[in-house]
Image: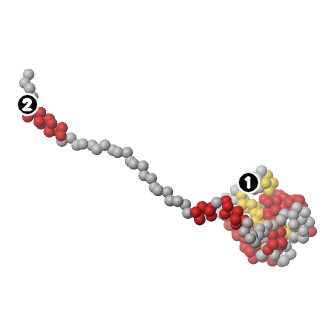
Amino acid sequence: MAAPSATSSAAANSSCARLPSVPLRRAAAAVSFPSRPRPAALAARAGPSRRLDVAAAAGHQKLVGSLTSNEGLRFGVVVARFNEVVTNLLLQGALETFERYSVKAENITVVTVPGSFEVPITAQKLGKSGKFDAILCIGAVIRGDTTHYDAVANSAASGVLNAGLSAGIPCIFGVLTCEDMDQALNRAGGKAGNKGAETALTAIEMASLFRHHLG
């Protein structure tokens, strides 16, 4: 057999040389950023010692309403009749809480109105009369198939806030805004407690704060 010629060997070597070379991929080097030292002033400001210094500052006062210093405090309670099966339970929870904290029955005035929409204007009128230290606003708005729920719920919330600002005394928001009757009943003495009782507690504390510290 004849040996391959030098020409054919050179051609083979030449074709091999023309193959493209693929560079090997290098692993990305980890990048580290130098950490900047935290200023000592910031560290001191954030530490617990700073909070202790503030609490111990000369002249520091903490004003808190009391649930027991309620002698002579007078309360108005505005209750919506709409969804009465719920609002009666809320009112009951509020009155039982007043009794539990020794608020005398003669110092409590209950006013009923058609619905939650009428609660704020009535609360404002009572607040401006000068006869009360706090007003409880009790109602229940339950979502239906229309947008009426949103209108009443929003009006009740903003109205009670404005009533308190206008009258200058605490007007406590105790209007339930629920998706269905089950949610409302759960918040009127059921699994989620009684919003009426919570409203009464808030009213006592706020009335005490205004009478003894902010009056």
Q: Quadrant of the C terminus?
A: bottom right
Visible residue check, residue 198: yes
Residue drawn at x 87%, y 67% is 70
- Tell me where residue 27 sits by quadrant: top left
| Quarter assignment of residue 177 | bottom right
Whether 16 is drawn above or below 163: the answer is above
Between marks 1 and 2, how big is the CA–CA gap?
97 Å
Image quadrant containing the N terminus: top left
In front of the other: label 1 or label 2? 2
Q: Callout 1: few (<14), some (14-19), or many (20+) C-alpha neighbours within 10 Å?
A: some
The disc placed on residue 106 is none
The residue to which callout 2 is attached is 5
Q: Who's the residue at 64% across and 60% down the image?
A: 47
Q: What residue is drawn where x is 35% and y is 45%?
A: 26
In front here: 131 or 111? 131
> Residue 31 versus residue 75: which sits nearer the camera?
31
Q: Residue at x 7, y 24 (%)?
A: 2
Residue 181, image x and y in percent? 74, 55
Percent coordinates x, y for residue 60 in the rendering: 75, 70
- Type of amino acid under label 1: Gln
Q: Quadrant of residue 33?
A: bottom left
Is residue 66 left or right of 46 when viewed as pictured?
A: right
Residue furthest to the top: 1
Label 2: element kind = loop
63 left or right, relative to 31: right
Location of residue 114 with respect to 5 vertically, above or below = below
Task: List x then y, in percent, for residue 178.
Answer: 71, 58
Q: Residues within 10 Å of mark 2 (few under 14, many from 20)?
A: few
Q: Amino acid at mark 2?
A: Ser
Q: Nearer the viewer, residue 76 or 143?
A: 76
Q: Which residue is mark 1?
A: 183
